[in-house]
Image (cartoon, rainbow, N blue to C red):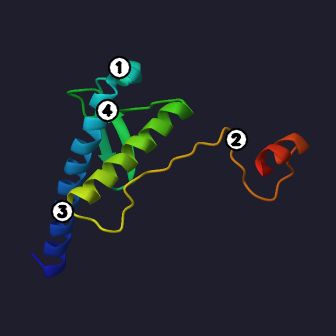
Amino acid sequence: MTASMKELGGMLGVANGVTKILDEAIQEYISLTKVALGNYGEYRSAFNYTDKKLHLRKPKTASTENVGSSSNHMLLHLFLFLGLRELVMRNNGIHVAPFLIIEQFSRPYWGMTTIRTSTKATLQR
């Protein structure tokens, strides 16, 4: 085995370990909120390290589910960032704030497009 293959294997091992710990941290949040999650309350965290994306999977399955609505995607983002924050804090990370701010706009604003006057006035408040 060449040195670069060993190095790659070591990196993959670390990634798998971090992914497992991250999934455990996220799963704690899913368990805390399972009543509010309805159908997804019993699902398991399935972070995809390659895509850097959180999915949910049914217990005792390997395939992930399509969670559908933007509200569900927002919850996945929230779980992911809470899990990442917890992972960093467990490792004595000093460059992470002790709070998390997440805002979901009802309509994204993509730049120099025309905005209705009423929307523009609301945004300026």
Q: Residue type at mark 3?
A: Val
**Foreground of the two, 8 or 39:** 39
Closest to the camera, between mark 4 and mark 3, is 4
Closest to the camera, between mark 2 and mark 1, is 1
For the residue labelled by badge 2, is the local secondary structure a helix, a strand or a loop?
Answer: loop
How many angstroms separate mark 4 from mark 1 (CA)?
9 Å
Q: Residues within 10 Å of mark 3 (few under 14, many from 20)?
A: few
Per the image, the residue denoted by label 1 is 35
How many angstroms separate mark 1 from mark 3 (CA)?
33 Å
Q: Residues within 10 Å of mark 4 (few under 14, many from 20)?
A: many
Per the image, the residue denoted by label 2 is 107
Q: Position of residue 62 (x, y in %)?
A: 25, 34
Per the image, the residue denoted by label 3 is 14
Per the image, the residue denoted by label 4 is 30
Task: Judge from the rendering whether residue 70 lies leftward or rightward of residue 7; answer left or right.
Answer: right
Q: Position of residue 76 (x, y in %)?
A: 42, 39
How many angstroms separate mark 4 from mark 3 (CA)?
24 Å
First along the sequence among labels 4 and 1:
4
Query: In percent of the image, x 25 and y 44: which residue is there?
Result: 25
